[in-house]
Amino acid sequence: KLSWIARLKQGLAKTSSNLTTLFIGARIDEDLYDDLEAALLSADAGVEATVYVLDQLKRKVKEEKLTEAEQVKRALKELLIELLLPLQKPFELGRHQPLVMMIAGVNGAGKTTTIGKLAKHLQNHQQSVVLAAGDTFRAAAREQLMVWGERNNITVIAQESGDPAAVAFDAVASAKARGTNVVMVDTAGRLPTQLHLMEELKKIKRVIGKGMDGAPQEVLLVIDGNTGQNALAQVKAFDDALQLTGLIITKLDGTAKGGILAAVAKTRPIPVYFIGVGEQIEDLQAFNAQEFVDALLQ
Ligand code: GDP
C-alpha cells in the first residue's frame, strides 16, 4: 500500500502534471501566464485566487528579475505556500472539558467515514469520545453508527425517532456527567439550498449551547475534494449559517484537483484541520501547506 503522501500525490497528479509541464522549456511571456491561468482555473482554484496568484507572480518576476522558467516555478510554489499557510492550524485537544464538535456536510462528502477516523484518532490519543447520532433521517445510518461504536468501544447516543437537537443535547449531558473528553455530533447530510434543513442545523447548534456555555467549540464542515467550484458555495453557505471553525477536505487521493484550497484561502480562509486521502484511519492527516504544495507542484 502506498504511503499517504504518495496517495495525495497520486490524487493530485493531473493538476500537478498540468502545472509542471507548462514550465518546461517555457519563455517568460504572456503565453506562459495564459497557460498558468488555464491550469489554475481547471484545477478549481476559482477566478479570485487565480487572478491573485497571477498578479503576485508577475510582480515577483519583475521585482526579483527572474529570467528562467524554473525560477518562476519556484516563485509560484512560494506564492502558493504563502496563500495556503493561513489554512494550516493544528487541531488542539484538551482545551475544553468536554470539547464539543459539530460536523456538517452534504450527503456523500465523507462525513461518517471522517467521524469514524477522527474518533479513533482521538481515542488513540487517550481521549474518551461520545458520538451523537444526529442523522435521525436514516434509520440505517443510525444502526450502522451504533454497530461501529460497539465494535470500537465508543459510546453512541441515539434516539429511535427524533429530534437531532435533542440527541445532541443528550450527548453533551452524558459527556458532562461521565467526564468524557470529546463529543462529536454527527448531522444528516444536506444541501445549502434546503433552507429548512439549514435552519435545523442552526437549531442543533443553539441547543448544544444551552447544554453547555460556549459549546460547540468546533463546528466543522466536511467537503468532498472532488466537488469542484461548488465546494466554495458549500463553504460559504454553511459558514453563513453556522460560523464554521474548521474544514475537513476528503478524497484528495482520488482524482481531486486541489485548487479548491486556493479558492477557500482567498475567499473564506477557514482552517483546514484535516485532509482525507483514503478510507483507513491513517488516511486522515493534518493539513500542511508546504506538504500540500510539494504534492501539487513537483
Ligand atoms: P457521508 O454521506 O458524508 O457520511 O459520506 P460517507 O462517509 O458515507 O462517505 C461516502 C463515500 O466516500 C464512502 O464510500 C467512503 O468510503 C468514501 N470516502 C470518504 N472519505 C474518503 C477519502 O478520504 N478517500 C476516499 N478515496 N474515499 C473516501
Image: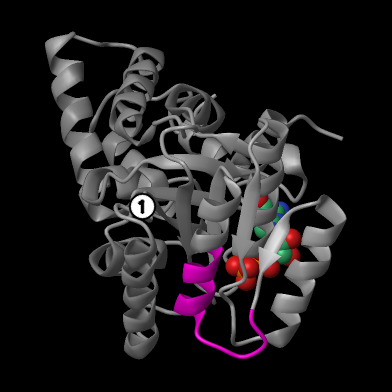
| Pick the front one: 122 or 8 | 122
User: At 18% from the left edge and 29% from the top edge, which residue is drawn?
Assistant: 56
Residue at the (28%, 23%) spot, across then down: 28
Residue at 59%, 46% (x, y): give it.
180
In the picture, residue 210 is in which quadrant? Answer: bottom left
Q: Is residue 260 above or below residue 157?
A: above
Most foreground residue, 206 or 83: 206
Query: Which element is circle 1 on?
Result: helix
**For residue 231, what is the image quadrant?**
bottom left
State which region is magenta. 159-171
Q: Is the CB of the residue bearing disc 1 within 8 angstroms of ligand 1?
A: no
Magenta span has 114? no
Give the quarter the ligand 1 occupies: bottom right
Q: Quadrant of the C terminus?
A: top right
Determine if residue 189 is in view: no
In this view, the residue in front, 70 or 106, is 106
Counting from the top left corner in percent of width and height, residue 118 is at 63, 46
Residue 227: % across, % down: 49, 64
Instruction: Give the percent coordinates (x, y) of residue 296.
Output: 51, 33
Residue at position x 32%, y 82% from top? Answer: 199
> How many callouts does the rendering have?
1
Q: Amino acid at mark 1?
A: Leu
Circle 1 packing at 10 Å, graded few (<14), some (14-19), many (20+), is: many
Q: On the image, numbered disc 1 is attached to which residue?
A: 41
75 to the left or right of 197: left
Task: Please say if 76 is above or below 93.
Answer: above
